[in-house]
Image: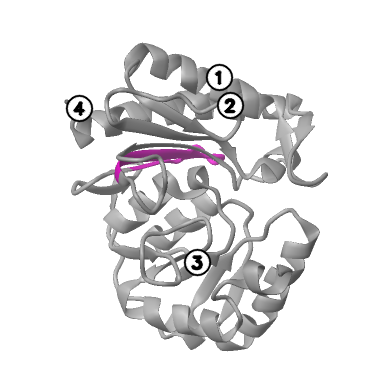
Amino acid sequence: MATPTDLESVARALAEEAGHLIVSGRSAAHIAATKSSAADVVTQMDLAAERLLRERLATLRPDDGILGEEGDDVSGSSGITWVLDPIDGTVNYLYGIEHYAVSVAAVSGPPRPREWTALAGAIYDGSGQLWSARAGGGATRGTQRLVRGDGPPLSTALVATGFQYVAQRRAIQGDIVARMLPQVRDIRRLGAASIDLVHVAAGLVDGYYEHGLQPWDFAAASLIAQEAGVRVASIDGGPPSQESTIAAPHNLWDELRDALVQAGGSDPFATREA
Protein backbone atom coordinates (compact mmCIF):
# COMPACT_ATOMS: atom_id res chain seq x y z
CA MET A 1 0.00 0.00 0.00
CA ALA A 2 1.47 3.33 -1.04
CA THR A 3 2.16 5.87 1.70
CA PRO A 4 1.43 9.61 1.41
CA THR A 5 5.20 10.09 1.03
CA ASP A 6 5.25 7.72 -1.96
CA LEU A 7 2.26 9.44 -3.51
CA GLU A 8 3.75 12.90 -2.99
CA SER A 9 6.88 11.78 -4.84
CA VAL A 10 4.77 10.64 -7.78
CA ALA A 11 2.69 13.84 -7.72
CA ARG A 12 5.81 16.01 -7.68
CA ALA A 13 7.43 14.12 -10.55
CA LEU A 14 4.30 14.22 -12.70
CA ALA A 15 3.50 17.87 -12.02
CA GLU A 16 7.06 18.89 -12.82
CA GLU A 17 7.23 16.87 -16.04
CA ALA A 18 3.88 18.12 -17.30
CA GLY A 19 4.82 21.63 -16.14
CA HIS A 20 7.97 21.61 -18.22
CA LEU A 21 5.90 20.42 -21.18
CA ILE A 22 3.38 23.24 -21.02
CA VAL A 23 5.91 25.98 -20.24
CA SER A 24 8.10 24.96 -23.18
CA GLY A 25 5.08 24.76 -25.48
CA ARG A 26 3.37 27.97 -24.45
CA SER A 27 4.48 30.11 -27.38
CA ALA A 28 2.74 27.73 -29.79
CA ALA A 29 -0.44 27.36 -27.72
CA HIS A 30 -3.73 27.69 -29.59
CA ILE A 31 -7.38 27.06 -28.82
CA ALA A 32 -8.43 23.49 -29.55
CA ALA A 33 -11.98 23.61 -28.17
CA THR A 34 -14.39 25.50 -25.90
CA LYS A 35 -16.49 24.15 -23.02
CA SER A 36 -19.07 26.01 -20.91
CA SER A 37 -18.89 29.18 -23.03
CA ALA A 38 -16.82 30.74 -25.81
CA ALA A 39 -14.56 32.21 -23.10
CA ASP A 40 -13.92 28.79 -21.52
CA VAL A 41 -11.14 27.49 -23.73
CA VAL A 42 -9.04 24.35 -24.04
CA THR A 43 -5.66 24.54 -25.75
CA GLN A 44 -3.85 21.70 -27.48
CA MET A 45 -1.37 21.84 -24.59
CA ASP A 46 -4.13 21.09 -22.04
CA LEU A 47 -4.81 17.93 -24.00
CA ALA A 48 -1.14 17.05 -24.40
CA ALA A 49 -0.38 17.56 -20.71
CA GLU A 50 -3.30 15.43 -19.54
CA ARG A 51 -2.35 12.72 -22.02
CA LEU A 52 1.19 12.71 -20.59
CA LEU A 53 -0.12 12.49 -17.00
CA ARG A 54 -2.43 9.61 -17.85
CA GLU A 55 0.30 7.72 -19.67
CA ARG A 56 2.70 8.09 -16.76
CA LEU A 57 0.06 6.96 -14.25
CA ALA A 58 -0.80 3.94 -16.39
CA THR A 59 2.82 2.88 -15.96
CA LEU A 60 3.53 4.03 -12.40
CA ARG A 61 0.13 3.43 -10.76
CA PRO A 62 -1.88 1.13 -13.07
CA ASP A 63 -4.41 0.10 -10.40
CA ASP A 64 -5.40 3.65 -9.47
CA GLY A 65 -8.37 5.62 -10.76
CA ILE A 66 -8.22 8.94 -12.60
CA LEU A 67 -10.50 12.00 -12.44
CA GLY A 68 -9.24 14.51 -15.00
CA GLU A 69 -10.49 17.72 -16.50
CA GLU A 70 -9.96 16.87 -20.16
CA GLY A 71 -10.53 13.10 -20.36
CA ASP A 72 -12.81 10.27 -19.33
CA ASP A 73 -12.83 9.10 -15.74
CA VAL A 74 -10.98 5.86 -15.03
CA SER A 75 -12.10 3.48 -12.29
CA GLY A 76 -9.33 1.87 -10.24
CA SER A 77 -9.08 -1.08 -7.87
CA SER A 78 -6.59 0.35 -5.35
CA GLY A 79 -8.88 2.83 -3.60
CA ILE A 80 -6.71 5.74 -4.79
CA THR A 81 -7.79 8.23 -7.45
CA TRP A 82 -5.58 10.81 -9.17
CA VAL A 83 -7.29 14.16 -9.68
CA LEU A 84 -5.68 16.00 -12.60
CA ASP A 85 -5.81 19.52 -13.95
CA PRO A 86 -3.36 19.75 -16.87
CA ILE A 87 -3.57 23.55 -16.95
CA ASP A 88 -5.44 25.48 -14.29
CA GLY A 89 -5.68 29.03 -15.61
CA THR A 90 -5.82 28.20 -19.32
CA VAL A 91 -6.80 31.72 -20.37
CA ASN A 92 -3.77 33.12 -18.51
CA TYR A 93 -1.66 30.47 -20.23
CA LEU A 94 -3.01 31.42 -23.64
CA TYR A 95 -2.16 35.08 -23.03
CA GLY A 96 1.29 34.41 -21.56
CA ILE A 97 0.40 35.40 -17.98
CA GLU A 98 2.34 33.22 -15.53
CA HIS A 99 -0.57 32.55 -13.17
CA TYR A 100 -1.31 29.02 -14.37
CA ALA A 101 -0.37 25.59 -13.07
CA VAL A 102 -0.41 21.85 -13.55
CA SER A 103 -2.21 20.24 -10.61
CA VAL A 104 -1.85 16.59 -9.54
CA ALA A 105 -3.48 15.12 -6.42
CA ALA A 106 -3.93 11.63 -4.99
CA VAL A 107 -7.07 10.99 -2.92
CA SER A 108 -8.59 7.96 -1.24
CA GLY A 109 -12.25 7.08 -1.05
CA PRO A 110 -15.01 8.09 -3.49
CA PRO A 111 -13.82 10.57 -6.14
CA ARG A 112 -16.07 13.29 -4.74
CA PRO A 113 -14.56 16.24 -2.85
CA ARG A 114 -16.80 16.07 0.21
CA GLU A 115 -16.19 12.33 0.60
CA TRP A 116 -12.54 11.82 -0.33
CA THR A 117 -9.42 12.11 1.82
CA ALA A 118 -6.58 13.98 0.14
CA LEU A 119 -3.31 12.08 0.56
CA ALA A 120 -0.80 14.03 -1.56
CA GLY A 121 -0.66 16.79 -4.11
CA ALA A 122 1.64 18.95 -6.18
CA ILE A 123 1.30 21.92 -8.49
CA TYR A 124 3.89 23.32 -10.88
CA ASP A 125 3.20 26.94 -11.72
CA GLY A 126 4.05 29.06 -14.74
CA SER A 127 7.00 30.71 -12.97
CA GLY A 128 8.66 27.32 -12.45
CA GLN A 129 7.78 26.88 -8.77
CA LEU A 130 6.91 23.40 -7.51
CA TRP A 131 4.55 23.30 -4.55
CA SER A 132 3.61 20.06 -2.79
CA ALA A 133 2.23 18.45 0.34
CA ARG A 134 1.30 15.10 1.84
CA ALA A 135 -1.26 14.36 4.51
CA GLY A 136 0.30 14.90 7.90
CA GLY A 137 3.67 15.76 6.39
CA GLY A 138 3.52 19.51 5.83
CA ALA A 139 3.78 21.59 2.67
CA THR A 140 6.65 23.04 0.67
CA ARG A 141 7.29 25.67 -1.98
CA GLY A 142 10.42 24.47 -3.73
CA THR A 143 12.64 23.57 -0.80
CA GLN A 144 10.99 26.05 1.58
CA ARG A 145 8.64 24.75 4.25
CA LEU A 146 5.31 26.58 4.25
CA VAL A 147 3.95 27.62 7.64
CA ARG A 148 1.13 30.14 7.60
CA GLY A 149 0.60 32.20 10.76
CA ASP A 150 -2.34 34.33 11.78
CA GLY A 151 -3.93 36.70 9.32
CA PRO A 152 -4.94 40.34 9.80
CA PRO A 153 -8.47 41.51 10.59
CA LEU A 154 -10.81 41.33 7.61
CA SER A 155 -10.73 45.11 7.16
CA THR A 156 -7.02 44.98 6.27
CA ALA A 157 -7.05 41.57 4.53
CA LEU A 158 -6.06 41.15 0.89
CA VAL A 159 -8.53 38.63 -0.50
CA ALA A 160 -8.40 36.68 -3.77
CA THR A 161 -11.35 35.35 -5.74
CA GLY A 162 -12.25 34.05 -9.17
CA PHE A 163 -15.11 34.03 -11.66
CA GLN A 164 -16.76 31.42 -13.83
CA TYR A 165 -17.04 31.62 -17.60
CA VAL A 166 -20.84 31.60 -17.93
CA ALA A 167 -21.98 35.22 -18.21
CA GLN A 168 -24.96 34.93 -15.85
CA ARG A 169 -22.81 33.43 -13.11
CA ARG A 170 -20.07 36.02 -13.61
CA ALA A 171 -22.66 38.76 -13.07
CA ILE A 172 -23.72 37.14 -9.79
CA GLN A 173 -20.10 36.85 -8.67
CA GLY A 174 -19.51 40.48 -9.63
CA ASP A 175 -22.38 41.56 -7.37
CA ILE A 176 -20.83 39.64 -4.47
CA VAL A 177 -17.43 41.26 -5.09
CA ALA A 178 -19.04 44.69 -5.05
CA ARG A 179 -20.44 43.96 -1.59
CA MET A 180 -17.18 42.44 -0.33
CA LEU A 181 -14.89 45.26 -1.48
CA PRO A 182 -15.82 47.79 1.23
CA GLN A 183 -15.13 45.19 3.92
CA VAL A 184 -11.54 44.26 2.97
CA ARG A 185 -8.23 45.91 2.08
CA ASP A 186 -8.67 44.95 -1.57
CA ILE A 187 -9.55 42.02 -3.83
CA ARG A 188 -7.30 40.25 -6.33
CA ARG A 189 -8.39 38.12 -9.28
CA LEU A 190 -5.45 36.13 -10.70
CA GLY A 191 -7.39 33.60 -12.75
CA ALA A 192 -6.31 30.24 -11.31
CA ALA A 193 -7.80 28.70 -8.17
CA SER A 194 -4.76 26.54 -7.45
CA ILE A 195 -2.50 29.60 -7.48
CA ASP A 196 -4.87 31.52 -5.21
CA LEU A 197 -4.90 28.69 -2.68
CA VAL A 198 -1.13 28.25 -2.47
CA HIS A 199 -0.74 32.02 -2.30
CA VAL A 200 -2.78 31.96 0.91
CA ALA A 201 -0.41 29.27 2.19
CA ALA A 202 2.60 31.44 1.34
CA GLY A 203 1.12 34.64 2.80
CA LEU A 204 0.95 36.38 -0.58
CA VAL A 205 -2.76 36.98 0.02
CA ASP A 206 -4.67 36.72 3.29
CA GLY A 207 -7.73 34.84 2.12
CA TYR A 208 -9.53 33.40 -0.86
CA TYR A 209 -13.08 32.44 -1.77
CA GLU A 210 -14.79 31.17 -4.89
CA HIS A 211 -18.04 29.56 -5.98
CA GLY A 212 -18.37 26.91 -8.69
CA LEU A 213 -14.94 25.30 -8.69
CA GLN A 214 -14.40 21.84 -10.14
CA PRO A 215 -12.68 19.12 -8.06
CA TRP A 216 -9.45 19.29 -10.07
CA ASP A 217 -9.22 23.05 -9.45
CA PHE A 218 -8.59 22.62 -5.73
CA ALA A 219 -7.70 18.97 -5.00
CA ALA A 220 -3.93 19.47 -4.73
CA ALA A 221 -3.76 23.14 -3.73
CA SER A 222 -6.27 22.82 -0.88
CA LEU A 223 -4.12 20.08 0.70
CA ILE A 224 -1.02 22.26 0.29
CA ALA A 225 -2.80 25.15 1.99
CA GLN A 226 -4.16 22.98 4.80
CA GLU A 227 -0.78 21.40 5.49
CA ALA A 228 0.68 24.92 5.72
CA GLY A 229 -1.83 25.79 8.46
CA VAL A 230 -4.64 27.36 6.44
CA ARG A 231 -8.26 26.46 7.02
CA VAL A 232 -9.89 25.44 3.72
CA ALA A 233 -13.61 24.69 3.89
CA SER A 234 -16.94 25.33 2.23
CA ILE A 235 -19.21 28.09 3.42
CA ASP A 236 -21.03 25.64 5.72
CA GLY A 237 -17.77 24.72 7.46
CA GLY A 238 -17.51 21.30 5.84
CA PRO A 239 -14.88 20.15 3.31
CA PRO A 240 -14.26 22.42 0.30
CA SER A 241 -16.73 21.74 -2.48
CA GLN A 242 -17.85 22.68 -5.94
CA GLU A 243 -20.47 24.96 -4.38
CA SER A 244 -18.05 27.05 -2.31
CA THR A 245 -14.43 27.12 -1.18
CA ILE A 246 -13.01 29.53 1.41
CA ALA A 247 -9.35 29.58 2.51
CA ALA A 248 -7.86 31.76 5.24
CA PRO A 249 -5.77 31.52 8.41
CA HIS A 250 -7.83 30.05 11.24
CA ASN A 251 -8.22 33.38 13.05
CA LEU A 252 -9.64 35.05 9.91
CA TRP A 253 -11.75 32.26 8.40
CA ASP A 254 -14.98 32.85 10.33
CA GLU A 255 -14.90 36.60 9.73
CA LEU A 256 -14.35 36.08 6.00
CA ARG A 257 -17.14 33.49 5.83
CA ASP A 258 -19.58 35.73 7.71
CA ALA A 259 -18.85 38.65 5.39
CA LEU A 260 -19.38 36.42 2.40
CA VAL A 261 -22.75 35.24 3.75
CA GLN A 262 -23.81 38.86 4.27
CA ALA A 263 -22.71 39.64 0.70
CA GLY A 264 -25.07 36.99 -0.68
CA GLY A 265 -22.55 34.21 -1.05
CA SER A 266 -24.30 31.41 0.83
CA ASP A 267 -25.62 29.69 -2.30
CA PRO A 268 -25.65 32.42 -4.92
CA PHE A 269 -26.23 30.40 -8.08
CA ALA A 270 -29.15 28.39 -6.67
CA THR A 271 -30.76 31.57 -5.31
CA ARG A 272 -30.24 33.85 -8.31
CA GLU A 273 -30.62 31.34 -11.14
CA ALA A 274 -33.86 29.79 -9.88
- Residue 51: percent from left, percent from top: 55, 19
| Main SS of residues in magenta | strand
Mark 3 or mark 2: whose residue is earlier in sequence? 2
- Decide: few, some or many residues near mark 1? Use Cα within 10 Å; few <14, some 14-19, many ≥20: some
Query: Which residue in the protein does label 4 denote?
Result: 2
Q: Residues within 10 Å of mark 3 (few under 14, many from 20)?
A: many
Question: Which residue type carries mark 4?
Answer: Ala
Q: Earlier in the sequence, mark 3 or mark 1?
A: 1
Q: Residue furthest front?
A: 274
Rendering coords of residue 256 (x, y %): 46, 79
**100 sits left or right of 156 in the view:** right
Q: Give the distance between the C-alpha atoms of the residues marked 3 and 2, in whole angstroms.
A: 28 Å
Q: Are marks 2 and 1 in contact (CB under 8 Å)?
A: yes
Asked which colour scheme the image uses, the reply is one colour
What residue type is disc 1 on?
A: Arg
> x and y percent of residue 136 in the render?
18, 49
- The magenta span reads 118-132
* Quadrant into which the C terminus falls: bottom right
Q: Residue at x 71, y 77 (%)?
A: 175
**Element assignment for label 3:** strand
Q: CA distance from mark 2 to mark 1?
A: 8 Å
Packing grade of label 4 (10 A; few <14, some 14-19, many >=20) is: few
Q: Which mark is residue 51?
A: 1
**Residue 208, numbered label:** 3
Between label 2 and label 1, give the one nearer the viewer: 2
